Amino acid sequence: MLDFSQGIEKLKKHMQSAFGIAEIRVTMAKQEKDQTNEKDVWRYNVEFSENGKIVKAMVEINAITGDLLLFQRDSQWRI
C-alpha cells in the first residue's frame, strides 16, 4: 500500500501527465475505503493555478496501484 509520500508523488505525476499541471497544493489527504468498501484509496483536495485563477479539485487514486480513479474540478472532498 502506498504511504503518504508515495501517494503524493503518484498524485503529482498524474496531474502533470494527464492534465499538464506542474504545481499543485494539497489541502487535504485521507486514506480510506472507496464507496463500495472494496478498494483502499487516497483522496485529495488540491489547488492549482490555471490562467491566473486558483482552481480547486478533488482527486482519488488507488492506494495499492497508484492508478488515477477520479479527477473532478470545482469540487472538494468533505472531511
Image (cartoon, rainbow, N blue to C red):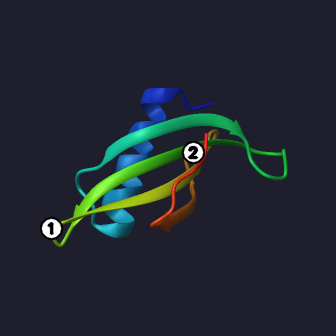
Position of residue 51 relative to residue 4, above or below, is below
Residue shown at 36%/58% (left/top)? Answer: 15
Query: Amino acid under label 1?
Result: Gly
Where is residue 41 shown, x and y percent of the image?
Answer: 65, 43
Q: Which mark is residue 43?
A: 2
Q: Residues within 10 Å of mark 1 (few under 14, many from 20)?
A: few
Q: Nearer the viewer, residue 25 or 78?
A: 78
Q: How many marks?
A: 2
Residue shown at 29%/49% (left/top)? Answer: 24
Q: Which mark is residue 71?
A: none
Position of residue 2 relative to residue 54, above or below, is above
Snapshot quadrant of residue 54:
bottom left
Residue shown at 58%/35% (left/top)? Answer: 30
Quarter of the N terminus within the rendering: top right
Where is residue 50 shown, x and y percent of the image?
Answer: 23, 68
Snapshot quadrant of residue 49:
bottom left
Q: Nearer the viewer, residue 79 or 45?
A: 79
Q: Residues within 10 Å of mark 2 (few under 14, many from 20)?
A: many
Residue lying farthest to the front in this orientation: 78
Residue position marked by numbered label 1 in the rendering: 52
Comes first in the chain, label 1 or label 2: 2
Residue shown at 34%/63% (left/top)? Answer: 17
Position of residue 6 relative to residue 36, above or below, is above
Judged by depth in the image, the label closer to the viewer, 1 or 2, is 1
The answer to whether marks 1 and 2 mark residues whose Cβ atoms lie closer than 8 Å is: no
Quarter of the C terminus within the rendering: top right
Q: Secondary structure at mark 1?
A: loop
Query: Amino acid under label 2?
Result: Arg
Where is residue 55 shown, x and y percent of the image?
Answer: 32, 63
Q: Secondary structure at mark 2?
A: strand
Q: Is residue 45 left or right of residue 54?
A: right
